[in-house]
Image: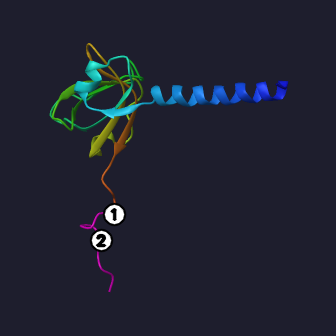
């Protein structure tokens, strides 16, 4: 076999290995119970903000810590620790996706996605005459 054939086979095998590795380590959607069972894995948890409990953000003491309570689609509520600043318009959000891992004291998120109500809702549109 030529050296070029061997190099091509090594490159192909490396690509296949990289694809399998990326599929096994990819992040998936789950609820709080599933993320609690597999604490070493990063999950996306979809839920709604519990507005009746404390939403804490004190940039003077720690600008990279924001805590709140989230209820997932199964109705399970957990305290969420977001290790970033409080997102703009967070209080207006309808749905929240937190990305992170479960720990003993709650869900520790490395990122957050918020879905805010549309500013162009049907109730606000008016007919122009």
**Within the image, what quadrant is residue 33 found in?**
top left
Image point (33%, 59%), residue name: 119
The relative height of residue 122 versus residue 73 in the rendered view (above or below) is: below
Tag 2 and tag 1, C-beta contact below 8 Å: yes
Residue situated in front as seen by the camera: 102 or 40? 40
Mark linked to residue 105: none
Residue 55 position, x and y percent, is: 25, 29
The relative height of residue 80 versus residue 46 in the rendered view (above or below) is: above
The relative height of residue 64 versus residue 112 in the rendered view (above or below) is: above
Residue situated in front as seen by the camera: 122 or 27? 27
Within-10-Å neighbours for mark 1: few <14, some 14–19, many 20+: few
**Within the image, what quadrant is residue 101 found in?**
top left
Residue 107 position, x and y percent, is: 30, 22
Distance between the alpha carbons at the discs numbered 2 and 1: 7 Å
**Main SS type for the magenta part?**
loop
Q: Which residue is mark 1?
A: 120
Image point (18%, 29%), residue name: 77
Instruction: Compare marks 2 and 1 and give the one earlier in the sequence.
Output: 1
Element under disc 2: loop
Q: Which residue is mark 2?
A: 125
Image point (29%, 63%), residue name: 121
Residue 92 lies left or right of residue 27; in this view the side is left
Magenta segment boundaries in residue numbering: 120-129
């Amino acid at each position: 076999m030529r050296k070029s054939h061997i190099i091509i086979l090594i490159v192909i095998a490396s690509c296949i290995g990289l694809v399998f590795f990326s599929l096994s380590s990819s992040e998936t959607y789950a609820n709080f119970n599933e993320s609690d069972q597999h604490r070493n894995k990063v999950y996306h948890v979809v839920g709604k903000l519990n507005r009746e409990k404390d939403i804490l953000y004190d940039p003077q003491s720690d600008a990279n810590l924001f805590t709140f309570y989230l209820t997932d689609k199964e109705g399970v509520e957990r305290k969420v620790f977001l290790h970033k600043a409080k997102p703009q318009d967070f209080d207006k959000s309808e749905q929240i996706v937190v990305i992170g891992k479960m720990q003993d004291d709650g869900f520790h998120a490395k990122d957050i996605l918020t879905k805010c109500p549309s500013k162009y809702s049907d109730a606000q549109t008016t007919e122009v005459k």
